[in-house]
């Protein structure tokens, strides 16, 4: 789950895939992209996330050592809450406007658990990559599993 915090009004907004959402003052906004894993954000905000594991009852029954082993097994982040837009993070795509909309892109399968997102949008955008802040496409790890909100979904 990706969330943004507006630096102006401190409102926290959960991003969703169906439409662009904005903070209370209107100076920040965002939305999940069509690949359902990356997101477009705009305005004066910072992004953070909560791993789907945070919502997994079975995972939360594990002790800390078991959680570390399980995270490594599935290639998950080392914790359940993280800051976005660190160098190398291809999941956050920033535009200037807080009003959106999300970037236009074409999404293709690129491997067993990867998607290739090809940017079609003419607007200026950036991704926090050291070598190329505006790539023509990105490859993202993506198993296209259902949302953490689906009670039948388990990460195992």
Image: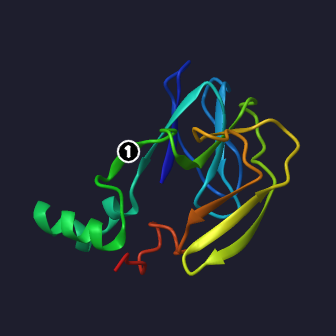
Residue drawn at x 36%, y 63% is: 76
List x then y, in percent, for residue 2: 50, 49
**Which residue is rendered at x = 42% and y = 78% of the image?**
153
Where's the C terminus, which quadrant? bottom left
**Colour theme:** rainbow
Taking the image as shown, residue 77 lies to the left or right of residue 97, namely left
In this rendered view, identify the residue nearer to me: 132 or 96. Answer: 132
In the image, 91 versus 22, the foreground residue is 91
Q: Residue at x 39, y 57 (%)?
A: 51
Q: Does residue 120 lie above or below 83 as drawn?
A: below
Q: Residues within 10 Å of mark 1 (few under 14, many from 20)?
A: some
Q: Residue furthest front?
A: 131
Residue of label 1: 82
Position of 70 with respect to 76 (left or right) is left
Q: Secondary structure at mark 1?
A: strand
Identify the residue at image location x=35%, y=72%. 74
Q: Is residue 131 visible?
A: yes
Q: Is residue 107 above or below residue 49?
A: below
Foreground pick, 141 / 66: 141
Which residue ends up furthest to the right in the rendered image? Answer: 122
Q: Is residue 63 at all visible to an observer of this figure?
A: no
């Amino acid at each position: 789950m990706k969330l943004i915090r507006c630096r102006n009004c401190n409102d926290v907004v959960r991003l969703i895939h169906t439409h662009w959402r904005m903070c209370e003052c209107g100076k920040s906004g965002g939305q999940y992209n069509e690949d359902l894993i990356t997101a477009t954000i705009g305005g004066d905000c910072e992004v953070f996330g909560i791993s789907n594991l945070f919502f997994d009852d079975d995972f939360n029954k594990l002790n800390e050592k078991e959680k570390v082993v399980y995270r490594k097994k599935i290639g998950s982040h080392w914790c359940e809450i993280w800051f976005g837009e660190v160098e190398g993070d291809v999941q956050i795509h920033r535009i200037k406007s807080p009003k959106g909309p999300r970037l236009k892109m074409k999404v293709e399968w690129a491997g067993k658990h990867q998607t290739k997102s090809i940017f079609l949008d003419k607007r200026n955008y950036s991704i926090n990559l050291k070598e190329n802040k505006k790539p023509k496409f990105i490859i993202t790890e993506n198993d296209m599993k259902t949302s953490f909100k689906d009670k039948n979904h388990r990460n195992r």
